[in-house]
Amino acid sequence: EVPEPARRRGVVASGTPRAGTMGCFFSKRRKAEKESQPEGEEERPKQYSWDQREKVTKLRLENCNIYIFDHSATVTIDDCTNCVFYCSCYRPILLLVDPKDYMFSGLKDETVGRLPGKVAGQQFLIQDCENCNIYIFDHSATVTIDDCTNCVIFLGPVKGSVFFRNCRDCKCALACQQFRVRDCRKLEVFLCCATQPIIESSTNIKFGCFQWYYPELAFQFKDAGLSIFNNTWSNIHDFTPVSGELNWSLLPEDAVIQDHVPLPTTEELKAVRLSTEASRSIVPVSRGQRQKNSDESCLVVLFAGDYTIANARKLIDELVGKGFFLVQTKEVSMKAEDAQRVFREKAPDFLPLLNKELQST
C-alpha cells in the first residue's frame, strides 16, 4: 500500500533532500500551457539540454522514498543512495547506483574500460580525458563525450545518441542510433549508425564503416534495439557547411581499423575475445557512398524466416568472395505499396510474404 504522504499532491523540492518523501501526480497537458499563453506573445525558441548544461542543478538524494504516478518515456536516476522508488504499479525498487561507475573523467595517459555486463544499458559520460584508450564493451543508453584530446575510444551498441563536444585528435569505433559531433576537429570514426550522422561547427572529421567482433556483441545489439543491417555511416549531414570546403571525408577503403583503434593491452580488457577482421565483423562492412567501380548493380531481398540473419550474412560473405561490392544493407518492414514499387509487375508473387518482417540487403 502506498504510504499516506504519497497520496497528497507532490511538491517541488530544492536543496539536498534527506530522509524525505516526494513525488508528483498527473501532469497538465501542454495544450493547457499553450492556451494560457497571452495572445500575441511569441512562443519562445526551444531550448535543449546540451545548450543549458552549465545551468543544470543536480540533487543528491539519500534515504528518500520517491513516487512517480504518471507515464514517462525514460527515467534517469543519478546520485541516489539507499532510496526506494515506486513506479505506477506500486512495486518498490531499491537502487544503489554509483554515478562514478558510469563515467571516465579527468584521466590522462591511462587505458580503462568496462567489460560486458558492467554498463547494462545505463547512460555513460566521458569527459576531460587526454591521451587515453577507453573501451566500453557493453551496451548503453546514451554516451556523451566532452573535452577529450588524443584519445582512442570504443563504444559497444548505444540505444540512443552518441554526442561528441569539444574533442580533438580522437580515434573511435562505435555503434549507435544517433551520432552527433559539435565543435570538434580531427576525429576518425568507424561508425555504425541507424540514422543520418550529423556534424556541426566541426572540421576534418573522417568516417569509416564499423568493423568489430566479440562474442557478446550480437546480443548487445539486440539489447540496444539496433539492427546490424541498418547502417548509414557514410550519409553525413553537415549543419554548418563552408563554401568551397568539406568538413568531413571518408577514410580510405583499405584502412585497417586496428591501425586507428588498436586492441586494448591491459590484462583485464584482453580477456574479451576481440577481432577486427572484416570477415568476422558483426556489422557487414559496406562501401557506403564511396565512388562506384561499376555502373552495374543489383538488389537482393531476403524475407524474414528461420535463420534470416545467419542466411543474410552467409549470402553477403559468398557474394563478396566472388568479387561483388556490398554498397548498403537495410532491414525494413515492407507494405503492399512498397512491394509494388520494388517488384513492379512481379509484386503479386511476393504479397503473401508481406505478413512477415522483411530484411532486404
Image (cartoon, rainbow, N blue to C red):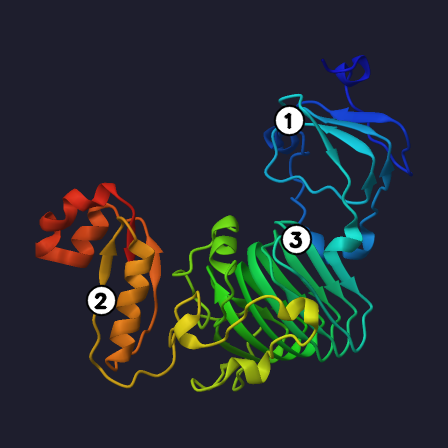
User: Where is residue 53 drawn, in percent x and y?
Assistant: 77, 56
Q: Which residue is mark 2?
A: 299
Give the Cα distance between marks 2 and 1.
47 Å
Q: Secondary structure at mark 3?
A: loop
> What's the mark number on residue 70?
1
Give the Cα distance between marks 2 and 3.
38 Å
128, above or below 69, in the image: below
State how many labels appear. 3
Residue 204 seen from this side:
yes
What amino acid is labelled 2 in the image?
Leu
Query: Is 189 left, or right, of 93 in this rendering?
Result: left
Q: Which residue is mark 3?
A: 119
Q: Secondary structure at mark 1?
A: loop
Mark 2 or 1: the one toward you: 2
Q: Residues within 10 Å of mark 2 (few under 14, many from 20)?
A: few
Query: Is 292 left, or right, of 203 in this rendering?
Result: left
Query: Is 222 left, or right, of 313 in this rendering?
Result: right
